[in-house]
């Protein structure tokens, strides 16, 4: 039991360190918009936040049907990219919020880039 708790504490410490490091780098560049990703084991959400802290648009894959989680996420990102284009957002910083750049998070970034939004 002790090894499990230590492993969880280590993983949490690594996650929080990544989150702090990523947020410091992104916020120091003063982007006009940033895409913030929030990921759980089942679902993934993203928000586009302006420089003054207001949420411009957001998307979640809870209601979207798909073969697997990555497929659902790609359909959600297509909708997010369409919303961003509608708002006139052509460039945004990608804030992965401490998550590793792998799987659904990477799929989000790649899909947004294919829609012509610079990250």
Image (cartoon, helix red, strand yellow):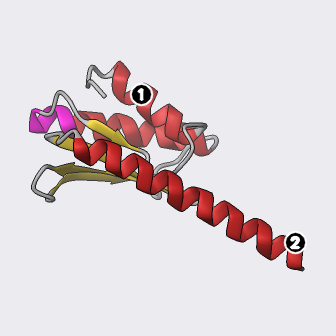
Closer to the N terminus: mark 1 or mark 2? 2
| Extent of the magenta region | 84-88
Q: At x 53% / y 49%, what residue is drawn?
A: 99
Q: Residues within 10 Å of mark 2 (few under 14, many from 20)?
A: few
Secondary structure of the residue carrying numbered label 1: helix
Q: At x 9% / y 56%, what residue is drawn?
A: 52
Query: Farthest residue toward the bottom?
Result: 1
Cα gap from disc 1 to disc 2, whole angstroms: 39 Å
Image-based side of 103 in relation to 72, left or right: right
Q: At x 52% / y 33%, what residue is drawn?
A: 106
Q: Which mark is residue 111?
A: 1
Please identify the quadrant where the N terminus is shown: bottom right
Q: Which image quadrant for residue 33?
A: top left
Please identify the quadrant where the C terminus is shown: top left
Q: Is residue 85 magenta?
A: yes
Q: Position of residue 21 (x, y in %)?
A: 43, 50
Q: Position of residue 86 (x, y in %)?
A: 13, 35
* Residue behind mark 2: 3
Q: Nearer the viewer, mark 1 or mark 2?
A: 2
Q: At x 20% / y 29%, what residue is drawn?
A: 91
Q: Position of residue 16 (x, y in %)?
A: 52, 61
Can residue 47 be seen from the camera position used here?
yes
Magenta-highlighted stretch: main secondary structure? helix
Image-based side of 2 in relation to 59, left or right: right
Secondary structure of the residue carrying numbered label 2: helix
């Amino acid at each position: 039991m002790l090894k499990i708790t230590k492993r969880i504490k280590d993983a949490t410490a690594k996650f929080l360190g990544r989150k702090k490091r990523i947020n410091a780098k992104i916020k120091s560049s003063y982007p006009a918009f940033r895409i913030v990703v929030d990921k759980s084991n089942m679902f993934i959400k993203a928000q586009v936040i302006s420089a003054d802290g207001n949420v411009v648009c957001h998307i979640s894959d809870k209601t979207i049907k798909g073969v697997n989680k990555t497929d659902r996420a790609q359909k959600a990102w297509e909708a997010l990219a369409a919303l961003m284009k509608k708002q006139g957002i052509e460039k945004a910083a990608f804030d992965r919020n401490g998550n590793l750049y792998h799987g659904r998070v990477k799929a989000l970034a790649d899909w947004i880039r294919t829609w012509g939004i610079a990250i």
